[in-house]
Image (spheres, rainbow, N blue to C red):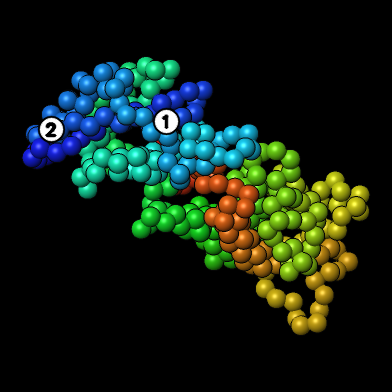
């Protein structure tokens, strides 16, 4: 029970039309008392405040969704799903703070956020905070741990740590245990996943990612050869895909260690691919991909988060332990 003196508290309304947030409404109150009393006051005033709140266009940090015409303040829109993603990683105040600053709020303002759809506040369900999980006070979102939250440090999203933990650490364990085939499978599968995260699920994202971000010439192979190894190794644990068997593409063979200087990696049986070199080059490729991501050349963080939530990872709830294992 956190009790304080009189302070300004706020009902914040997100006006939603066609799954887009089109404006933000704010109504201030003054209240002294516990958090429960402040919450009760704001909840009781939701319906009347939704009608009387001062409306603001979305702040400038929101990219407009439009038809390519020059953006104006009133044209700014934010997908509702994008707001939910901001909420999940504890960044929903990025949307609200610029608007709230007009009211000179306290350092840690007490607010209740409520969506308004077609003019009607959406408050339903059961919760001790408010009657909808979409209308909880902002501090509730901050303590809710999204699996990506651990990678937001001092306001910066550490993309490289996320990729390392989910993909490269397990592969490194296998390499350090002197395996060859299992880490190679995971590396080739990771290219598929990185392609999906970068480009979605349209077309051959393995080849697209490989062409855009992997320096295959440093591995002395081609994208087509890497693709055929992926098909054969992941699906059948063999070197020979249909195209390899028909001699359309060279066979790639896995190895570790180094060829003697001056000795070619190509033999009568096929072309040797160094798994350690593959590991390092795919790791470097994620740096190139990350640079494009954060420079906004092709992707945006919201799309990345949306896609990342669909993949299986040791770091979030899609992977669950039962019993004690083997």
Q: Is residue 190 above or below residue 20?
A: below
Disc on res. 23: 1
Mark with earlier residue (1, 2): 1
Q: Is residue 58 visible?
A: yes
Q: Indicate left or right for 49 with 165 as reference.
A: left
The picture places residue 30, in percent across and down from the top left corner, at: 15, 33
In depth, the one of 116 and 266 nearer the eye is: 116
Q: Is residue 45 above or below residue 204?
A: above
Question: Residue at coordinates 13% horizontally, 29% vertically from top-left?
Answer: 37
- Which quadrant does the N terminus fall into? top left
Question: Residue at coordinates 81% horizontally, 54% vertically from top-left?
Answer: 224
**Residue 54 in which image quadrant:** top left
Q: Is residue 108 above or below residue 129?
A: below
Q: Is residue 308 visible?
A: no
Q: Cα distance, mark 1 to mark 2?
A: 26 Å
Disc on res. 52: none
**Residue 251 in which image quadrant:** bottom right
Q: Are marks 1 and 2 in contact (CB under 8 Å)?
A: no
In depth, the one of 324 and 268 nearer the eye is: 268
Q: Alpha-carbon neighbours of circle 2 within 10 Å: few (<14), some, or many (≥20)?
A: some
- Residue that carries the numbered disc 2 in the rendered image: 31
Give the structural element (helix, strand or loop) at label 1.
strand
The picture places residue 221, in percent across and down from the top left corner, at: 79, 63
In depth, the one of 173 and 56 nearer the eye is: 56
């Amino acid at each position: 029970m956190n009790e304080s003196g009189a302070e300004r508290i706020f009902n914040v309304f997100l006006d939603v039309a066609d799954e887009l947030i089109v404006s933000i409404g704010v109504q201030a109150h003054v209240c002294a008392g516990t958090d429960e009393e402040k919450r009760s006051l704001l909840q009781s005033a939701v319906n009347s405040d939704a009608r009387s709140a001062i409306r603001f266009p979305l702040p400038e940090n929101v990219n407009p969704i439009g038809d390519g015409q020059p953006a104006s303040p009133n044209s700014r829109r934010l997908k509702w799903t994008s707001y939910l993603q901001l909420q999940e990683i504890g960044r929903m105040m990025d949307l609200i703070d610029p608007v709230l600053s007009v009211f000179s709020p306290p350092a840690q303002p007490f607010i209740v956020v409520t969506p308004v759809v077609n003019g009607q506040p959406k408050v339903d369900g059961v919760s001790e905070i408010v009657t909808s999980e979409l209308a909880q006070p902002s501090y509730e979102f901050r303590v809710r741990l999204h699996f990506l939250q651990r990678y937001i440090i001092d306001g910066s999203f550490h993309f490289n740590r996320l990729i390392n933990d989910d993909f490269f650490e397990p592969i490194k364990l296998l390499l350090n245990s002197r395996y060859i085939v299992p880490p190679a499978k995971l590396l080739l599968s990771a290219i598929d996943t990185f392609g999906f995260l970068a480009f979605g699920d349209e077309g051959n994202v393995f080849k697209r990612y490989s062409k855009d971000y992997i320096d295959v010439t440093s591995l002395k192979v081609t994208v087509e050869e890497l693709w055929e190894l992926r098909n054969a190794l992941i699906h059948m644990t063999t070197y020979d895909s249909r195209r390899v068997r028909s001699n359309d593409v060279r066979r790639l063979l896995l190895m570790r260690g180094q060829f003697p200087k001056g000795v070619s990696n190509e033999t009568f049986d096929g072309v040797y691919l160094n798994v350690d070199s593959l590991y390092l080059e795919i790791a470097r490729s994620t740096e190139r991909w990350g640079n494009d991501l954060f420079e906004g050349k092709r992707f945006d963080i919201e799309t990345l988060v949306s896609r990342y939530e669909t993949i299986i990872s040791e770091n979030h709830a899609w992977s669950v332990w039962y019993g004690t294992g083997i």
